[in-house]
Image (spheres, rainbow, N blue to C red):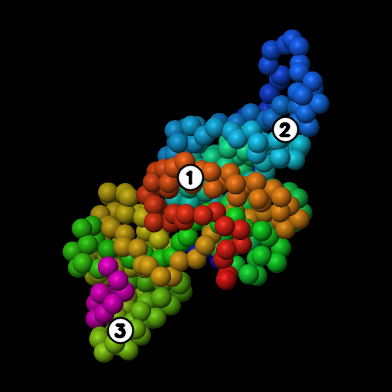
């Protein structure tokens, strides 16, 4: 899970196409259309970056006119203002041009926005500045691998969209047959000295000794790359990292690694919306649930090899309970 982020200067990554469509055709207008609340046309669907791995899936999403009609006039005609904190692949990363945001979070934001029948922009922001941005009205929604918890719910309503925990990274083929933490009792595990992986290794090692088995032989390094290298070179049997990061690294054949999901320590990550706009949160929840039900959601996760993050229901504020 993400609790901190590198400080960076915000860079706007606007997904172009937030133009208001001109009325198509001419001729007589029905009385019902003339008197409709949402007579003004909705913003055009924003183009999907060419190197977005779920591009074809996103582009197949159709708008739900009932949901579109319930958006505020500003969101319907001008688009939804999303924010994320880029730099946590495969969840959020820059596309090849260095200007467009791709990844699981951007793809889900795109799909939700298309189901709602409007356009969108997405802006890179320092992680801890996103909720204040919602409160100030600068953004309508955030999606950035943010844990839904009771403290954040004081200001923010969360639409839960994935669950995430941790994973072991082992050599490709998993030659040691690692499936649960106790399989590493008495074996060498590489961790980042100041990271959460070190604390997890200590916890799992203590469980080994409590069960009468040998403790972990822990190798501590300054960063992930060194810990990964220890596994690749055979110095360590495994390293510990966040589940989506593990799957992203294992998906690259050049790394010669495999991911082993650690069950039982997952937390819900949520799409954040200011508490003052609970009606909009409900619309996002309905849009996301419809994407879950029709298979779009699963296809997006599969495009990034993180099927293990899937949940069945888009709950509101389901975390921290």
Residue found at x 72% / y 58%: 275
Q: Quadrant of residue 196?
A: bottom left
Q: Residues within 10 Å of mark 3 (few under 14, many from 20)?
A: many
Q: Residue 82 at what x, y percent from top left?
A: 64, 46
Label ID, residue 77: 2
Image: magenta residue range: 179-187
Q: Which residue is mark 1?
A: 293
Q: Residues within 10 Å of mark 2 (few under 14, many from 20)?
A: many
Q: Residue 11 at what x, y percent from top left?
A: 62, 46
Between 314 and 157, which is closer to the camera in this rendering?
A: 314
Residue found at x 72% / y 11%: 26
Label ID, residue 7: none
* Mark earlier in primary sequence (2, 3): 2
Is residue 183 a member of the stretch shown in magenta? yes
Label ID, residue 208: 3
Q: Nearer the viewer, mark 2 or mark 1?
A: 1
Q: Residues within 10 Å of mark 1 (few under 14, many from 20)?
A: few
């Amino acid at each position: 899970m993400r609790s901190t982020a590198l400080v960076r200067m915000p860079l706007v990554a606007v997904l172009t196409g937030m133009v208001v469509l001109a009325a198509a055709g001419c001729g007589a207008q029905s009385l019902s259309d003339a008197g409709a609340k949402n007579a003004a046309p909705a913003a055009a669907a924003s183009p999907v970056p060419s190197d977005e791995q779920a591009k074809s899936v996103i582009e197949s999403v159709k708008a739900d006119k009932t949901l579109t009609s319930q958006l505020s006039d500003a969101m319907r005609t001008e688009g939804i203002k999303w924010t994320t904190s880029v730099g946590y692949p495969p969840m959020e990363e820059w596309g090849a041009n260095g200007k467009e945001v791709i990844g699981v979070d951007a793809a889900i934001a795109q799909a939700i926005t298309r189901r709602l029948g409007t356009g969108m922009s997405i802006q890179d922001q320092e992680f801890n500045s996103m909720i204040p941005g919602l409160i100030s009205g600068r953004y309508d929604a955030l999606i950035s691998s943010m844990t839904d918890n009771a403290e954040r719910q004081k200001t923010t309503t969360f639409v839960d969209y994935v669950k995430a925990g941790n994973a072991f990274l082992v050599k490709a083929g998993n030659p040691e047959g690692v499936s649960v933490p106790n399989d590493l009792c008495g074996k060498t595990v590489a961790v980042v000295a100041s990271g959460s992986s070190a604390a997890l290794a200590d916890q799992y090692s203590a469980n080994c000794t409590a069960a009468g088995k040998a403790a972990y032989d822990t190798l501590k390094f300054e960063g992930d790359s060194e810990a990964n290298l220890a596994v690749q070179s055979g110095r360590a049997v495994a390293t510990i990292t966040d589940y989506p990061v593990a799957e992203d690294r294992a998906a690259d054949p050049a790394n010669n690694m495999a991911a082993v999901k650690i069950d039982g320590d997952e937390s819900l990550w949520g799409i954040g919306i200011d508490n003052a706009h609970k009606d909009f949160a409900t619309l996002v929840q309905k849009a996301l649930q419809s994407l879950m039900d029709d298979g779009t959601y699963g296809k997006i996760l599969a495009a990034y090899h993180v099927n293990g993050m899937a949940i069945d229901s888009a709950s509101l504020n389901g975390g921290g309970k």
